[in-house]
């Protein structure tokens, strides 16, 4: 995998970790997430005036992708309500990595080197280590674990559908913009009657708008990477976002890095050069 693509995927992961941390920090995750998705869709609308529309064959993939993305978000929000964010988030990303890798071979015909498989396994392992550290010695409840794993599976399916749509669209950036509009609309439709939704969005408007812009930049970066590189490797690099979240907590929020988190960062660092082979 080309160095520029690796760097783009890692930058996408860093941006993803940044907006996720900002949304979490509001203390009203569902409301802030809804506002963020709506903001991301609104930000892209001007771009669609200048970009060519995706080809007709891409719209079916987009519709299916947005549906599974919506299901995945609802599952993860349920998990966040019942379990620790620091455990749910990395475990869901690890699930995505472990689901996408074999499915990309079976359904997309991708071929991965032994080194790439080892690198993907390292990233998944590092995310599981992070989740273990975040639990603080307490078991995740069966319901939390179920919602987390289900959310990860749905998100993995979303990525696979997205890649097919992106590659058939003829205009990957326009595809990403249209998908953002649809995703934001679906989320708003689902949460529109939530008590205090608009009050919370207005209260956290800076986070909402800022995270919407950053999340869109992150998504468009990975959209470009998906057009150039294998989806399993690209997705694995993108899912290092959980590791960047840990680094943000250490260097920005001045939180202490646990031993398992230190090991997780080391393992993920070893994975990056393997994914380039």
Image: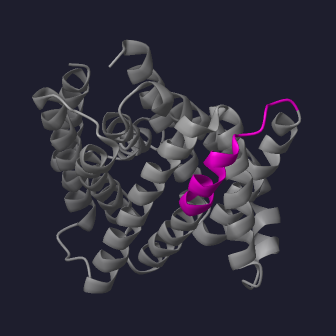
Closer to the camera, 74 or 249? 74
Q: Who's the residue at 71% across and 43% down the image?
A: 177
* Image quadrant where one finds the C terminus: top left
The residue nearer to you, when weighing 104 against 244, is 104
Q: How many marks?
A: 0
Nearer to the camera, 225 or 124: 225
Q: Split into 4 quadrants, where in the image is the N terminus?
A: top left
Q: Is residue 137 above or below residue 240?
A: below
Residue under the point 78% across and 42% down: 44
Residue at the top extreme, as displayed: 3
- Name the side, left or right, on which 14 lies relative to 213: left
Q: Can residue 213 be seen in this view?
A: no
Q: Can residue 154 be seen in this view?
A: yes
Residue at the (28%, 36%) spot, across then down: 110
Q: In this image, 96 relative to 25: left or right?
A: left
Give percent across and percent down for residue 234. Answer: 38, 34
Where residue 5 appears, x then y in whole percent?
Answer: 43, 21
Please give the name of the residue rendered at 41% of the width and 68% of the height, measured from the top-left corner.
151
- The prevailing secondary structure element of the residues shown in magenta is helix
Magenta stretch encompasses residue 225 = no
Question: Residue 159 at what x, y percent from top left?
Answer: 45, 50
- 115 or 147, nearer to the observer: 115
Highlighted magenta segment, given as a residue range: 50-65
| Extreme residue toward the front, this view | 57
| Whether residue 150 is situated above or below residue 161 in the rendered picture | below
Asked which quadrant contains residue 268, the reply is: top left
């Amino acid at each position: 995998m080309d160095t520029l693509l690796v760097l783009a995927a890692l930058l996408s992961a860093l941006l993803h970790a940044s907006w996720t941390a900002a949304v979490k920090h509001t203390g009203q995750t569902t409301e802030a997430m809804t506002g963020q998705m709506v903001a991301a869709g609104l930000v892209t609308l001007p771009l669609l005036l200048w970009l060519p529309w995706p080809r007709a064959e891409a719209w079916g993939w987009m519709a299916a992708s947005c549906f599974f993305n919506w299901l995945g978000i609802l599952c993860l929000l349920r998990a966040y309500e019942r379990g620790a964010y620091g455990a749910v988030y990395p475990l869901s990303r690890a699930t995505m990595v472990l689901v996408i890798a074999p499915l990309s071979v079976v359904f997309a015909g991708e071929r991965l080197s032994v080194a790439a498989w080892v690198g993907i396994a390292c990233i998944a392992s590092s995310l599981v280590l992070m989740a273990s550290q975040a639990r603080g010695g307490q078991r995740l409840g069966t319901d939390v674990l179920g919602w987390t794993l289900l959310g990860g599976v749905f998100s993995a399916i979303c990525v696979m559908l997205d890649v097919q749509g992106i590659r058939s669209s003829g205009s990957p950036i326009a595809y990403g913009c249209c998908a953002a509009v649809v995703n934001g609309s679906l989320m708003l439709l689902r949460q529109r009657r939530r008590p205090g939704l608009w009050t919370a969005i207005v209260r956290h408007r800076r986070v909402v708008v800022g995270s919407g812009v950053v999340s869109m930049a992150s998504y468009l970066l990975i959209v470009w990477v998906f057009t150039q590189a294998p989806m399993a490797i690209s997705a694995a690099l993108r899912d290092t976002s959980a590791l960047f979240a840990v680094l943000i907590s250490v260097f920005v929020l001045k939180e202490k890095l646990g031993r398992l988190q230190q090991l997780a960062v080391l393992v993920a660092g070893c994975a990056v050069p393997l994914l380039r082979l």
